[in-house]
Amino acid sequence: MRNALTAGHEYPDDDCSELRIKLAEQHGVRTEQVLVTPGSTGMLSLLCQILLGPGRNAVTSAQSFIVYGMLVRASGARLIETALLRDGFDLEAILGAINAETRLVFLANPNNPTGTLLEAGEIEKFLAAVPEHVIVVLDEAYYEYAAHFAALRKAEYSRSLEYVRRGARVVVVRTFSKVHGLAGLRIGYGMGPPELLGYCARMAHTYGVSSVAQVGALAAMADQAHIKQTVADNGAQAQILTRGLEDLGWRVVPTWANFVYCEIGSEASQFAALMREDGIAIRPLAAWGAPKCIRVTVGKAEQNQRFLDAARRVKSGVI
Ligand SMILES: *Cc1c(COP(=O)(O)O)cnc(C)c1O
C-alpha cells in the first residue's frame, strides 16, 4: 500500500482487473461474475439503485444490518421487516412477506447484530421457493469467522458460490473490512449474474475504488496466515466473552461472527453510557428494537477482560 501511494497521482484501474481475476480464481467463478465496490455496502447500494425505486420494496428481518433500510429508503422504496425467530432470520416469514413489488431480499449470514447463522440446507430450500422476480442478497461479511465456527461445530455454513456458478438469481456479498482488517480503505465485492453486475457497474462511481485499496485487497487475499490466526483468536475470545457474560447471569446468543449479542435484563442504553464513562464503547440496541440488548465486538484478550471487569462493576452498581 505504501508503494501504491507513491503512484497516487495516477488514476486507479477502474475495472479492478487484477483483483477481479484473483477473486474469480479463488472462488471458482467467472470474472464477469465479480464486481469490486467501495466496501460491500457499495455493492448493496448499487443493487438498491438498480432494482428498487418508489412503489417497490425489499424484504429482510427485523434486527438486521442497519444499512439495508437506509439504502432501500434512499432509493424511494420500502423495507419490509419480518419478526425474529430464535434471534435470527425467519425464512418462512420472509417468503410470506414477498409480494409482486419485491425486488430484493437481504439475508445477513451471519446476522449483524444477533450473530445467528442460516445453514446451507435452509438457504437452499428458501432459494427454491423464492419467486423469479426477486434477487436474493447473501451478505457474507463475516464469512471467514462463520466458516471457522462451522468447522468446529460440525455445521454446514454456506454453498453460496455454487449458486453463483449455476447462474442463480443471487448476489453473494463479501468484504475486506472484517477479517482482513481493511475497513478504512473501503473495498468489498459482489458475485452474481453478469448482466445484473453489468448494470451495477454502469451506475458505479467512476474510479470509486482507490489504487491503494486494490493493492491492499490483493495483499490481504494472499495473507492466509493472518486470516487463520484472526479466526482462531476470534473463536477463542468469543468463547471467553460469552462465558464471562453468562457468568453475570445474562443471556448470550451463540455467535458465528466477531461480536456477541447479549440480553442484559435492564436498560441497555444506560448500561452503555456507564461503560462509556469507563472508556468502553459497546452498542446498545434500542434503535434495532431491542432496548435490553447489547452487541459487543470481540477484541483482544486484554480488551475483553477489561470489558468483563467493567461490566461486572456496572452491574453490581459500583460505577
Ligand atoms: C460490516 C458489514 C458489512 C461490511 O460493510 P463494508 O461496506 O464492506 O465495510 C456488510 N454487511 C454486514 C451485515 C456487515 O455487518
Image (cartoon, grey):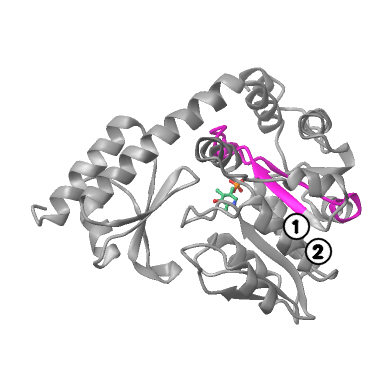
Q: Residue furthest right?
A: 195
Residue 75, percent from left and from top: 71, 70
Q: Is the Cβ of the residue at disc 2 closer than 8 Å to that at disc 1?
A: yes
Give the percent coordinates (x, y) of residue 29: 84, 38
Left/right placement of residue 82 relative to residue 270 reads right
Residue 21: percent from left, percent from top = 83, 30
Which residue is at a point 11% across and 55% down the rendered structure image? 316
x and y percentages locating residue 53 in the rendered image: 76, 74
Q: State yes or no: residue 187 in magenta.
A: yes
Q: Quadrant of the N terminus?
A: top right
Pick the residue in front: 6 or 96: 96
Per the rendering, the mark at residue 46 is 1
Q: Secondary structure at mark 1?
A: helix
**Cα separation between marks 2 and 1:** 6 Å
Asked if residue 99 is positioned above or below residue 244 in the image, the reply reads below
- The residue that appears at 44% across and 35% down in the rendered structure is 235
Say which mark, if any, is on residue 50.
2
- Asked if one can make out residue 202 in the rendered structure from this viewpoint, the answer is yes
| Image mark for residue 186 | none
Q: Amino acid at mark 1?
A: Leu
Callout 2: SS: helix
What's the amino acid at mark 2?
A: Ile
Q: Nearer the viewer, residue 166 or 310?
A: 166
Asked whether 292 falls inside the magenta stretch, the response is no
Name the outermost residue toward the top.
3
Q: Quadrant of residue 57?
A: bottom right
On the question of residue 73 being in view, the answer is no
**Residue 204, placed above or below residue 52:** above
- Neighbours of disc 2 within 10 Å: few (<14), some (14-19), many (20+): some
Q: Which residues are magenta?
A: 171-197
